[in-house]
Amino acid sequence: MAPVGAVYTFIALVTGSAWGKTDVGHLVGLDARLTSELVLLFLYVGAIALWHAFDDRKMAGRAAGILVLTGVVNLPVIHYSVEWWNTLHQGSTRMQQSIDPAMRTPLRLAITGYLLLFYHAFADADAQPDFNHGKTPPVGERTDTEKGAPVSTAFASWSDFFAMGGYAFYVWLAVAMTVVPVAILVVQSAMQHRAILRHVAQQRAREARMRAAQAQQEAV
């Protein structure tokens, strides 16, 4: 599933950047939506790399799962990025209701088509043979290649959890590369919000002083 998502995210980055060429005259780079999408692409690449970095499939599943769970915090950032930051990307279309009717139907058809294509790609990848057993096990019934038992995601102790089977450096580095950019985006958003509120308060105070001075002049 991760390779399919990575390809989709890469397409979104390329087409999203090219969109700015016709709208603002140059390729869009440091846009809030594209930046958060780039973090998502790094998450996909990190999950794929972790999955293939372990010989033990059980440990690989644990490491990739932890990274994916950590990256979930990036999803609301992607969704609300056009509302939290004032960037080149247009605001939310509110379920396509604010789009011109001439574009609404093609957009919905494109969304439906991409969802069907994603489902087909995911189902095709899942149907590939399990070369270790010579058969194709159903979804959710993958087994440990060594013991033939269902893969468990539990750790014996916290030390085993942080050690990650000797691959702690790579696992936690991948987690940090996901968490740090998201944290920076959130902190930047909070600081920008506070700056805007402070500017609005100063503007209102200035207007209040001007009205008070004008009232005094009229009284005289």
Image (cartoon, rainbow, N blue to C red):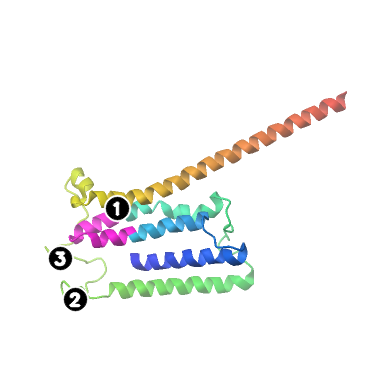
Instruction: Determine the image quadrant of residue 217.
Output: top right
Can I make out residue 151 in this image? no
165 relative to 108, above or below: above
Going from N to C along the chain, the mark reached first, 2 or 1, is: 1
Pointer 3 residue: 145
For marks 2 and 1, give the one nearer the viewer.
1
Pointer 2 residue: 135
Left or right, 37 with respect to 85, comes to left
Nearer the observer, 79 or 51: 51
Q: Position of residue 92 (x, y in %)?
A: 57, 58
Given the image, on which type of amino acid does mark 2 rest? Answer: Lys
Given the image, on which type of amino acid does mark 1 rest? Answer: Ile
Given contact means CB atoms under 8 Å apart, are the residues at marks 2 and 3 in contact? no
Q: Calculate the distance from the C-alpha at mark 1 to the C-alpha at mark 3.
A: 21 Å
Given the image, on which type of amino acid does mark 3 rest? Answer: Thr
Q: Position of residue 69 (x, y in %)?
A: 33, 53
Q: Quadrant of the N terminus?
A: bottom left
Q: For the point 22% across and 52% down, which residue is it? A: 167
Find numbered disc 2 in the image and state the secondary structure of the residue it sits on. Answer: loop
Bounds of the magenta span?
Answer: 46-65
Going from N to C along the chain, the mark reached first, 2 or 3, is: 2
Q: Position of residue 39 (x, y in %)?
A: 42, 55
Going from N to C along the chain, the mark reached first, 1 or 3, is: 1
Pointer 1 residue: 66
